[in-house]
Image: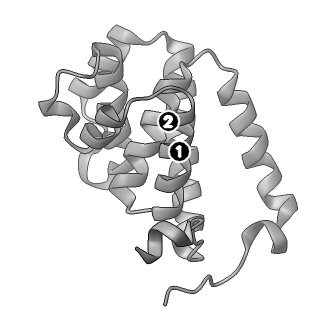
Amino acid sequence: MLKARLMPFEVAPGSLKPMVELEKILKNSGLEHSLIELVKTRASQINGCAFCLHMHTKDARAAGETEERLYLLNAWRESPLYNDRERAALAWTEALTLVAQTHAPDEDYEELSRHFTPAEQVNLTLLIGAINTWNRLAIGFRSIHPVETSRAAA
């Protein structure tokens, strides 16, 4: 059975405080809430972070995101359900989450620049960096997402 290695907020709350503050700033940065949750979910899919996938798909649903868009997010390039701005953000998310492989291609940046102001580009890039950091904390320390026992046992 999966067992947590340690609880980051319990052992280093002061170190995590700037990350929490960054999240508050990004939430109020002008980026759409739905876009923020799609980006967080997509990066978490790439990284295989169950804890963050659980959190951000739940948050996305609570904010009105559809099940269909969440189910198809892993294949967003083949689905007409995402608008051009979302597509640019998702491409940038993939490029930066996999930066060692992609090196942030010019084509992705050019598309990003067509749909996001310079300030939005910075905020989106910080958002992508933040979720990747959260993924690494959750995966590295084996954070376990909440489990609804009645459904999990079925």
Residue at 35% x, 39% y is 70
The picture quadrant where one finds residue 13 is bottom right
- Quadrant of the snapshot with the C terminus: bottom left
The picture quadrant where one finds residue 119 is top right
How crowded pointer 1 is (Cα within 10 Å; few <14, some 14-19, many 20+) is rated as some
Residue at 72% x, 38% y is 22
User: Mark 1 sits on what residue?
Assistant: 58
From the viewer's perspective, is 88 left or right of 17? left
Work out which residue is located at the far right of the displayed protein and give it.
14
Q: Secondary structure at mark 1?
A: helix
Q: Secondary structure at mark 2?
A: helix
User: Mark 2 sits on what residue?
Assistant: 61
How crowded pointer 2 is (Cα within 10 Å; few <14, some 14-19, many 20+) is rated as some
Estimate the x, y position of residue 10 in percent, counting from the top left. Answer: 83, 71
Give the answer, above or below, for where 57 lies relative to 9: above
Residue at 21% x, 24% y is 107
The amino acid type found where label 2 is placed reads Arg
Distance between mark 2 and mark 1 Cα atoms: 5 Å
From the viewer's perspective, is 72 left or right of 96? left
Estimate the x, y position of residue 96 in percent, counting from the top left. Answer: 38, 43
Give the answer, above or below, for where 118 lies relative to 48: above
